[in-house]
Amino acid sequence: MTMSMVRDIIVDAFTYALRMHGIAFLALSTKTIKYILTGYKSSSREVLHRIAIALLLNKLKICAKKSKGVLAGFYKGIYILYPAKDTYWSDATVVRSDEYCSQDLSNRLLALFMDIVPKIPIFMIDLSLWELHHEKEKLKLLKQVEVSINVIRRWLTDYHLVFVSAPSEALARLRKRVLFLCPWYIDSSPYSSIDRSQTLMLDPYAEETLSTEDVFRFNYFVIGGIVDRLYSRPYATYMIYRLHLLDVERKAIKLKGSSIGVPSEINKIIDLILSIKLGDKQMDEAIIDCMGIDDKISRIVYELTKVYRDRRDIGYSDIVEYMKLYRLSEHYLKKVLAKIRKGNYVGGNT
């Protein structure tokens, strides 16, 4: 997926807000550059996106301070300047929240920014079954939620991720892990304020399969906050559905009619949906891109055994072909072979 194919509604709104405040040349302080760019090779779009999210989190400020800088990037009418002498003058400067700022424009910019940013899609993580989890599962669930917050920030804002029926214990533990602004409800009240005809529950055991068209048809996506690594809970999402009398459509994410290898982590589900809705991907492509290594290996073995009823007929060339299809490096060939050999099936044809 190329950058030109990504709909970055955050940057669209942010650059508009800057232009409406007469800011075309935006300088970054030295501290800001270290904060925004450390460890990254970033495009101008990505730099502006990170600045917008950091402003929301009150980690950066935009000051009505003119600074000299060298032209480092341009996107949507905004010139990005890095500190340098005898070059361009900026209209405003981005500084860290702990740096001095005599005239802070952040609140005005953010007010306009939030007015422009679309309020949908919304992802609703339902934590009704938190207490049913073992401590190790709670830790995995918290990790998935933490990563989900980072995922949502790559596409949208914290306000597009809502926690429903979330106990105070989960809130307290999550706050120790990450700073976030996501709305948090201890009850199910958010369900009463959304249009249920535009709401979908993502349930791996639903009879209907989610399509690319469905992703664009729905604006609210309900995801069960469930981890069942230690204890199987096959119909836990349906339990949430019944508990809250949701009366919304339920669909499963499947690849060619099967859920084998399809990512089940909350963060990957959110990324998958957004890569279709805002990233111009089709369903199959989005699923494959979100698969982990183990997911891909399981899927490849499943595909091969579906084609070859007798696993002894599976050859190395067949395995390599499917590895290419699922964009899995040949470095993992031995792992795929090991999975096949568990049934004493060793391919001989090449």
Image (cartoon, helix red, strand yellow):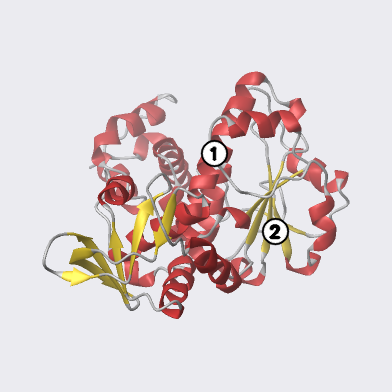
Helix, strand, or loop for circle 2? Answer: loop
Residue 271 visible in the picture: no
Q: How far across and down, in percent of the image, does residue 276 sit?
A: 50, 64
- Between 109 and 37, the one lying in front of the other is 109
Can you tell which of label 1 and label 2 is closer to the viewer?
A: 1
Q: How far across and down, in percent of the image, does residue 209 sit?
A: 64, 58
Helix, strand, or loop for circle 1? Answer: helix
Q: Amino acid at mark 2?
A: Glu
Of marks 1 and 2, which one's residue comes earlier in the chain?
1
Q: How far across and down, in percent of the image, does residue 181 sit?
A: 60, 48
**184 lies left or right of 90:** right
Residue found 71% across the figure and 45% down from its top: 184
**213 lies left or right of 245:** left
Q: Residue furthest front?
A: 102
Residue found 45% across the figure and 52% down from its top: 54
Q: Amino acid at mark 1?
A: Glu
Residue found 62% across the figure and 56% down from its top: 159
Q: Which residue is mark 2?
A: 208
- The answer to whether residue 139 is above or below residue 125 is above
Residue found 41% across the figure and 52% down from its top: 289
Q: Residue furthest top?
A: 135
**42 lies left or right of 51:** left
Quarter of the rendering occupied by the C terminus = top left
From mark 1 to mark 2, how far is it between C-alphas? 29 Å
Residue 161 visible in the picture: yes
- Between 1 and 165, the one lying in front of the other is 165
**249 lies left or right of 82:** right
**Dot 2: within a 10 Å radius of its alpha carbon, few (fewer than 14), some, or many (20 or more) residues?**
some
- The answer to whether residue 127 is above or below residue 124 is above
**Dot 1: within a 10 Å radius of its alpha carbon, few (fewer than 14), some, or many (20 or more) residues?**
some
Q: How far across and down, in percent of the image, does residue 218 sit?
A: 67, 67
Mark number, residue 146: 1
